[in-house]
Every structure is written in structure tokens, then in C-alpha cells.
Image: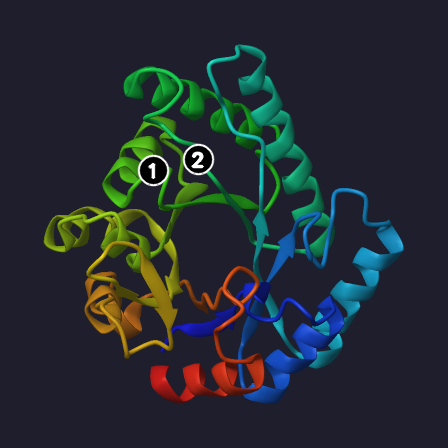
Amino acid sequence: MAKLSFTTMGTPEMTGVEAIQAARKYGYDAVDLRVSDHKGEITADTPKEDLRLLRGCLLSEGIELAGLLCYNVVGTEETSSWQAMTDSLKLHMEIGLKMGSPAIRMFGGNPHKEVPFNTFLQKSADSIRIALEAFDREPIEIVLQNHGGSYNAIEGVQLINAVGRDDFGLTFSPDHCVMMGEDMQEVYKQVPSVTKQLYASDVIMKPEGGYQGILPGQGDVPLKEAYQAIGGDDFKGYVSFKWEKIWQDHLEEPEIALPYFIEYWR
């Protein structure tokens, strides 16, 4: 059985300490903390002593850190943006090392908006590779989330192959595959070898367009199928409950959603 975590997008009113305590209370193995100026448990300016407090809380509660959700600078048509992207990734990796995080989650930007796709992909790969090379001897990875308005899952695999390093992989988010209309059978052929983490989230696709978040197992996302595709109970990465209450206030409170997910998954 994979280790279960949850992202603190689902607990926006909790402090980092409270989220860690909730993970222990509801039977999770780990938690994914956020590095963000918007209700993040950590920011780029969080003092070292506060990071030590969070890390100490993880240890005392017996909860692992599955990763840090980071909101990095992304590349654009501006030449300087690619160096800014590298610098942003390196900053987040430094925070990750201070927290003992195995990985940072990055966003890829929109590969279809600023410059030709192949150019965007190659510049992204170069920026990511430079950041990783700066931490060659350190136990930290970067994971890319496939995401609406950014790389879809198959394009994410292309980027991972272009970077060509074992310490860069995919946080596989099947809900975004559904939202972006991807061929799931083709996705299942390509993502298993590069998937390091699974984001478990469900949505209902609206006939008039758009989507609405819903508790896992009640919507249109084939979560069980996706889990089996990446190895099922042989999958060694974290399965993280992605409950986006921070963006969708109508969703159930964490006191309902967090225990629900544990029961649903097991």
C-alpha cells in the first residue's frame, strides 16, 4: 500500500503545525506543505527557526513530509525569465533541504502561449537541469505536475525526457487529464515510468463546460484505474489527497474530507 498524504490546499485555515497534527489524527503517513505567499505554511522569507519548528513538529508527530508545493517563476518570451525560473527553483530546493523534503513540486508554465512549443520545452528543460545540477549531491528532487493551462501529462513526459535526469519526474494528476480531455489509455502507457507521486482528486465535468470538485469516487476521474496503471499497491511514491478548498470554498471541511479519503482509499 502506498503512503497516504494530503496537500494543505485542503486545510487553508490551519497553520502548518495544525495540518501536521491533523495528519496524525486522521491516520495519514505524510503531508504536503505549501510554499506560497497566499496562505502558505512557508514563504520564501520564513525564518530558519520557524522552519525548524515545522520540521520538529513532523518528527514529534511521526509524520513524513511528502513534498513542498511550490509556485515558481515560469518562463515566458522574455529571455531573462528563464534565469529567473532557475533561480526560483533553486530557492525552493534550498527551502526543501532545510525542511528535509524529498521533493519540490513545480509548475511548468504554459508551453502553448509564449513561444513555440519545442522552444519552450527546451528552454524549460535547460532551466530545470541547471537547477538540479546545483544540488547534485543533495537528496532532493523536482516533480512537475501536469496541470490545466500548462503541460498535460503526455507533454510532461516529453519535458521529463528532455531533462533526462532521474531526479526529475511527474506528480501525476489524473483529474487534470480529464479536464484537459486527454486519452487516458495513452496516458497510462507513458506516465508509469516517470511518476513519482500521485495526486488523488476528483471532479464532475459540467455539460455547459468547466468542472466542479467533489469527493473522490463520486466524479468523473478514474482514480482506481490510474492507481493501477502506475503499479497499484506496488507503487513506491506518495498518494496525496488533493482537496482544493483553498480555491473552492464550497468543498467539504477538512474534518469531513480528510477521514473520508482515508476510508475511500483503503
Gap in Å between the C-alphas at discs 2 and 1?
Answer: 6 Å
Q: Examine the rendered structure and indicate whether residue 71 appears above or below residue 225.
A: above
Can you tell which quarter of the image residue 44 is in? top right
Residue type of the residue flagged with mark 2: Gly
Total numbered labels: 2
Q: Is residue 123 left or right of residue 39?
A: left
Q: Residue furthest top?
A: 79
Q: Amino acid at mark 1?
A: Tyr
In the rendered image, which quarter is residue 162 located in?
A: top left
Residue at which label 2 appears:
108
In the image, what residue occupies the spot 45% across and 73% down?
Answer: 3
- The N terminus: image quadrant: bottom left
Coloring basis for residues: rainbow
Q: Is residue 254 visible?
A: yes
Q: Residues within 10 Å of mark 2 (few under 14, many from 20)?
A: many
Q: Which residue is mark 1?
A: 151
Q: Position of residue 27 (x, y in %)?
A: 54, 86
Q: SS class of the residue under badge 1?
A: loop
**Decide: marks 2, 1 in contact (CB < 8 A)?**
yes
Residue under the image location 71 percent in, 55 percent down: 99
Residue 120, x across and y down, in percent: 37, 20
Q: In this view of the protein, which residue sits in the foreground, 65 or 18?
A: 18
Residue at point 55%, 80% (across, down)? 253
Residue 233 in the image, given as x and y percentages of width and height: 29, 74
